[in-house]
Amino acid sequence: MASSTFRVRIRIPRRVILGSQQLSRDDFFEALWNRFSGLGLLGVHEGTLLSEEAAEKGLETESWTVDAGEAPRERDWVEGQTEALAELYFDSQTHAEEASGQLRAETNLEIGPIEEQLPEDWDAQWKASFLSSPSGIDVPPFWKIVPPWLERSDGAETRILRINPGAGFGTGTHETTQLCLEALAESWPRVLEKQRSPRVLDFGSGSGILSIAAAILGARVDGVEIDPLAIDNALDNAKLNGVEDRVVFSKDLSAAQGHYPVVIANILKPVLLEFAEALVSRLDSAGVLILSGLIEADVSPVSARYGSLLGGRKPQVRALGEWRSLVWNRS
């Protein structure tokens, strides 16, 4: 089992005095690595500012924002803060104490106490999330989401989705995913009236759960996801469900060509608005459009934007908890 790490929290202004040097915050972080990498420094967390907090401080226009490693530089909200709360992680208490002592002697920074961080088994924690429903998660009208270690042999009408844990990629427990699964299942008979093996576009595919669900129903699916780690997770999940030959995952929407009887996008408002024309242009003339990742305040602007591209049609609005989905049936 992994050993403990030892955390030291430091409040860091925009300019830092280190000995005889005056450094920017970024240069100070680099100096920490240069000085302490041989003294057991394992990691530096440079601070966090949630999108809701950034919106409150006037650094972001949207309180709900999709974070990604490829986000533009202006999304570095921490950089805009007068003071950042950073965390240094060391391999031993002795190393943490020595580094803390040096920093106290050479800077005027506020340095917190040393805190032991016990190792955590994230996979075990994810598994534990299913214990409240040991047989899996039921999603109407016929889905059951189960982890790969749980054997299930339900009735012929049940559709089993096996999803492996993956940080932030979607395991089916979130309301937005369940709203999409419900809408997909209820729309499917109408889709099959027109095509026996329809194409589905899953934009923002994450863990691949919606792509896999469509493939289980008989579709050929193009999933689009900018995060390569999420794509790796999705490919593993597709193999778990035996549909790897029916789904293709790409990083760019340009890889999805032609028209689709079903287009699904389970992602947040700013991205849905940005890609509205691109998604509607790929929807078949009699297709089904399923959007989710929305809260109540998002429904009106997203409905208006897509409705204007769909001939003024109004969507069916579904709700689960605080989350909403929009469904357009063009047939």
Image (cartoon, helix red, strand yellow):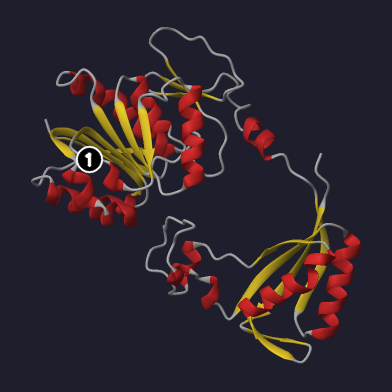
Residue 6 in view (yes/no): yes
Q: Is residue 129 left or right of residue 90?
A: left
Q: Quadrant of the N terminus?
A: top right
User: What is the residue that sits farthest to the right in this orientation?
Assistant: 94
From the top left corner, tell me how far across and down residue 98 is, in percent.
89, 70
Q: Name the residue rendered at 27%, 24% in the picture.
A: 186
Where is residue 227? Give x, y as percent. Answer: 46, 48
Quarter where residue 283 is shown: top left
Q: Secondary structure at mark 1?
A: loop
- Quadrant assignment, res 147: top right
Task: Identify the residue at horizontal 29%, vertical 51% (top origin).
Answer: 272
Find disc 1 in the rendering and name its residue.
257
Q: In the image, is 68 to the left or to the right of 316?
A: right
Q: Position of residue 75 (x, y in %)?
A: 45, 68
Residue 266 on image: x %, y %: 36, 42
Residue 161 as seen in the image, left or right of residue 82: left
Choose between 38 and 124: the one closer to the eye: 38
Task: Name the residue: 42% across, 66% down.
Answer: 72
Nearer-the-camera pick, 30 or 52: 30
Q: Which amino acid, mark 1?
A: Gln
Q: Quadrant of the C terminus?
A: top left
- Looking at the rendered structure, the number of numbered marks drawn on it comes to 1
Question: As displayed, is residue 318 above or below residue 103?
Answer: above
Q: Going by the picture, which residue comes out furthest to the left?
A: 311
Q: Is residue 170 visible?
A: no
Between 164 and 176, the one lying in front of the other is: 164
- Position of 101 compared to 33: left or right? right
Instruction: Count residues near mark 1 (Cα–Cα under 10 Å), then give few for <14, some for 14-19, many for 20+.
Output: few
What residue do we see at 41% from left, 36% from top?
A: 177
Residue projecting furthest to the top: 156
Q: Is residue 219 above or below residue 166?
A: above
